[in-house]
Amino acid sequence: MRDKNSIKIAIIGAGPLGIAAGRELLQQGFTHFTIFEKEDAPGGTWHMQTYPGLACDVWAHSYNYSFAPNPDWSSTFVNQPEIEAYLQKCAKDFGLEPHLSCNRCIVAAELQEDSRWLLRLDDGEEQLFDAVINAMGNQHTPVFPRFPGMDSFKGPSWHSAQYDHSVDLSGKRVTVIGSAAAAVQIVPEIAPIAGHLTVIQRSPNWIVPRNNKRYSAFAKKLFRKVPPVLKTLQALQGTMMRFVHGAVIMDSKRMQMFENMGLKFIEKAIDDPGLRKLVTPESRYGCKRPLVSDDFYPALNRDNVTLVASAAKSITEDAVVTEDGREIISDVIIYCTGYRVMDFDRFEVVGKVGKKLADEMKKGPYAYKGILVPDFPNYFLGMGPNAVVLSVSYFKSAEANVKCIVDLLSVMCERGIKSIDVKPERHKAYNAWVVESCKQFSWGSGTCKNYYRDEDGHAPFLYPGDYKSFLAMRADCTIDQFVTR
């Protein structure tokens, strides 16, 4: 048996996942851990990103920890400042502040002969840990397509993840490259300000109404004073999320229902028949991330907004050139081009016999049950490949993942186990099941192109099942499935 307080653990990242991991460690009696955060405060993507209109596209009362419901959400869908404040309050309430190490960036992790991990920080400091929980989120590394001539553009430009609020867009010719999650939130906010706004759309996305409603002071008081009411609302929103999840099963009646809903929304919200055609998706519902917005389509109706249905090809000193040859004169360019959701080379991770995690992940990426990769013992992935469940909020996936990891750490202490690694045969069998199971969903089918899928057609982001099966898989993640020493 090993004393839990003698185990030194590193958590990398203080977003929703890192905060959940820290709380779970404390709940199970681990106190000797550090949460490294590269930003100046906890909150993850909700602290780092601040673009206009940034909001969650999941019902608010589902988008929080199950053990920390928030009766004070202002509306059915909430904006970035509220979510950031909620996460920072949770970090404080859970007693994590003494464990936080902000403005500390990990630049390398290397397995030592004694099974500990050596972490190198950007200031040159080195620290040793018995285990590492990588809790970095999936929306931290912006995708910047390298268009020819990008560096020649003379005006200001930035990615939505690094929004420059110092630039006044009043009267400017603004071009937004991209028309997905960030764009549908930014465009309605800046359209009334810009002189002219051009939205460059490579391919249209399915959008359904958000129907956002503000909660009255009475409703929030009721949620606070009568917890069963809040629990009922959470259960209702959870049921709605599971219902929506059924729409991504290929050729299901529910998929057809949501496609019809999206088409009716286009018909109702878009005035011009030609514009309706441009925004009508050709892919099946759920192939790409479905979007929710009440005001993106109305913004496209504005006289000062133009939708260009052709991908960007190159950039000049004052324009964006599209694939169909159009030259869009621009004063400002905003790149809404997404993120590298499976990014394993933010810093170098070296395991057994010099293996590098980034190189191993180029083969898939694969991880056993989303948390461990062979030859990287005790290096746990808080949100690894195929560990996000579409039918519930990110918070529920995070809670289940970190509980599984900390449960394993507890058993290691109880049995005096120094390290655990993945059995190759189990790793191979599990991921063969994942690859096959993904094919039943629109986002994992062979005809679909999206950020869920890599160049080889593997869909490494989402778990290919519902939340019930995900919890069963997590419960079945026991110590006997690993190589121990």
Image: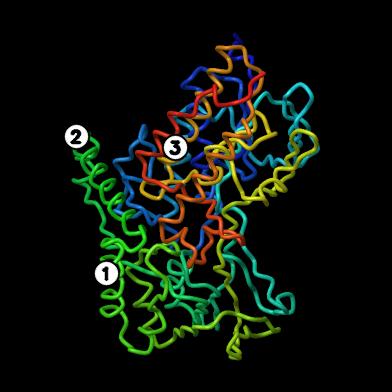
**Residue at x 55%, y 50% (from the top left corner):** 138
Q: Gap between marks 1 and 3, in whole Å?
A: 38 Å
Q: Quadrant of the N terminus?
A: top right
The three-letter code of the residue at mark 1 reads Met
In the drawing, does residue 451 fall left or right of residue 131?
A: left
The three-letter code of the residue at mark 3 reads Lys
Query: How far across and how far down the image is residue 171, in percent?
Result: 52, 83
Work out whether residue 312 or residue 384 is closer to the camera in this orientation and state it. 384
**Residue at x 42%, y 78% (from the top left corner):** 192
Q: Earlier in the sequence, mark 1 or mark 2?
A: 2
Query: How far across and how far down the image is residue 116, in percent?
Result: 72, 25
Work out whether residue 191 or residue 184 is closer to the camera in this orientation and state it. 184
Please identify, in this view, whether the residue under mark 1 or under mark 3 is nearer the observer.
1
Q: Gap between marks 2 and 3, in whole Å?
A: 22 Å
Q: Residues within 10 Å of mark 3 (few under 14, many from 20)?
A: few
Q: Earlier in the sequence, mark 1 or mark 3?
A: 3
Q: On the image, numbered disc 2 is attached to which residue? A: 226
Q: On the image, numbered disc 1 is attached to which residue? A: 261
Q: Earlier in the sequence, mark 2 or mark 3?
A: 3
Q: Secondary structure at mark 2?
A: loop
In the drawing, does residue 78 fall left or right of residue 355?
A: left
Q: Is residue 179 above or below residue 413?
A: below
Q: Is residue 307 above or below residue 87?
A: below
Q: Quadrant of the C terminus?
A: top right
Mark number, residue 73 = none
Q: Secondary structure at mark 3?
A: helix
Q: On the image, numbered disc 3 is attached to which residue? A: 89
The three-letter code of the residue at mark 2 reads Val
Outermost residue toward the top in this view: 1
Which quadrant of the figure has residue 131?
top right
